[in-house]
């Protein structure tokens, strides 16, 4: 009885039940191409680029508030930074974005 229990305990985790699901197909109409997002790049020289406009990192919170004045707070924000930057610089930008009311913020990596 103990041997059967041991065999059952070893084989039970490897047994998977798979339910076949018919997924709906997407529409063949045009895709939404006017997807708005805010791209923030931080260079190794601590220059912040917001949608192709350059700002100093020390002036970033005020500049970002002026930049997003009147924009929807549900707009996704993507932050990309040079990997040689200090952690404090990236967190400073992330904190400034979140304090301005944006909560869909993502740190983008190449991995």
Image (cartoon, helix red, strand yellow):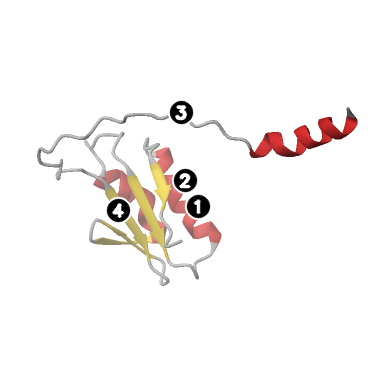
Q: Of the residues under marks 4 and 3, which one precedes in the sequence?
A: 3
**Does residue 34 lie above or below 17 as drawn?**
below
Residue at the image point whose x is 47% and y is 57% from the top = 90
**Residue placed farthest to the left in the image?**
29
Q: Of the residues under marks 2 and 3, which one precedes in the sequence?
A: 3
Contact flag, marks 1 and 3 (Cβ < 8 Å): no
Q: Disc 4 vs disc 3: which is toward the camera?
A: 3
Question: What residue is disc 2 on?
Answer: 95
Q: Quadrant of residue 97?
A: top left
**Which numbered dot is residue 91?**
1
Contact flag, marks 4 and 3 (Cβ < 8 Å): no
How far apart, in angstroms, are the residues tagged by discs 4 and 3?
A: 40 Å
How far apart, in angstroms, are the residues tagged by discs 2 and 3?
A: 43 Å
Q: Quadrant of residue 4?
A: top right
Q: Secondary structure at mark 3?
A: loop
Determine whether, in the image, residue 2 is placed left or right of residue 81.
right
Residue at the image point whose x is 76% and y is 32% from the top = 8
**Which numbered dot is residue 39?**
4
Question: What residue is disc 3 on?
Answer: 19
Q: Of the residues under marks 2 and 4, which one precedes in the sequence?
A: 4
Q: Secondary structure at mark 4?
A: strand
Q: Disc 1 vs disc 4: which is toward the camera?
A: 4
Q: Secondary structure at mark 2?
A: helix
């Amino acid at each position: 009885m103990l041997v059967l229990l041991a065999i059952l305990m070893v084989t039970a985790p490897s047994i998977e039940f798979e339910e076949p699901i018919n997924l709906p197909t997407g529409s063949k109409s045009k895709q939404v191409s006017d997807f708005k997002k805010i791209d923030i790049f931080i260079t190794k020289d601590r220059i912040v680029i917001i949608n192709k406009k350059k700002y100093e990192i020390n002036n970033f919170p005020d500049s970002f508030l002026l930049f997003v004045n009147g924009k929807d707070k549900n707009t996704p924000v993507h932050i990309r930074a040079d990997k040689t930057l200090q952690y404090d610089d990236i967190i400073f930008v992330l904190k400034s974005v979140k304090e301005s009311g944006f909560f869909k913020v993502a740190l983008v990596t190449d991995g």
